[in-house]
Image (spheres, rainbow, N blue to C red):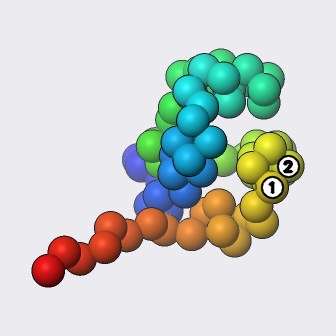
């Protein structure tokens, strides 16, 4: 079952010009695990949330906030 909240970590990672592999290495996790977190296929544990908060310098409320694309037009 997919996690319903889309993590904003993809946007934060891309804004920093980092690859999933680079972030996963910095957080001491495997790239597939990080990919699943980023895509929302894996719900993050409390430990993973703490690591993500520290790495990106953003509070959990911002990291877990669903992202919605802007409407064009």
For residue 24, what is the image quadrant?
top right
Instruction: Give me the residue at 52% from left, 42% from top.
Output: 14
| Count of marks placed on residues | 2
Left or right? Give the position of 24 relative to 28: left
| Residue 9 drawn above or below residue 64 | above
Label 2 Cα crowd, 10 Å radius (few <14 / some 14-19 / many 20+) = few
Q: Relative to residue 62, is residue 17 drawn left or right? A: left
The residue under the point 61% across, 63% down is: 64
At horizontal 80% and vertical 44% (from top left) the residue drawn is: 55
Q: Position of residue 53 (x, y in %)?
A: 79, 53
Closest to the observer, 16 or 28? 16
- Graded by Cα atoms within 10 Å as few (under 14), some (14 to 19) or many (20 or more), the crowding at tag 1 reads few
Q: Secondary structure at mark 2?
A: helix
* Residue 56 at x, y percent in the picture: 75, 49
Name above or below for residue 68 compared with residue 8. Answer: below
Q: Residue at x 45, y 43 (%)?
A: 39
Indicate the position of residue 71 as horizontal and vertical percent values: 23, 77
Residue highlighted by disc 2: 54
Q: Quadrant of the C terminus?
A: bottom left
Write down the quadrant of residue 62 in the picture.
bottom right
Determine the secondary structure under disc 1: loop
The numbered mark at residue 57 is 1
Q: Is residue 37 visible?
A: no
| Residue found farthest to the bottom | 73
- 58 versus 47 height, above or below: below
Q: Marks 1 and 2: in contact by CB < 8 Å?
A: yes
Tell me where residue 5 appears, x and y as whole percent. Answer: 49, 62
């Amino acid at each position: 079952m997919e996690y319903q909240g889309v993590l904003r970590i993809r946007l934060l990672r891309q804004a920093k010009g980092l690859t999933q592999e680079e972030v996963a290495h910095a957080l001491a996790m495997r790239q597939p695990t990080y990919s699943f977190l980023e895509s929302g296929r894996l719900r993050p544990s409390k430990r993973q949330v703490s690591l993500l908060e520290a790495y990106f310098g953003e509070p959990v409320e911002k990291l877990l906030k669903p992202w919605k694309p802007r409407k064009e037009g």
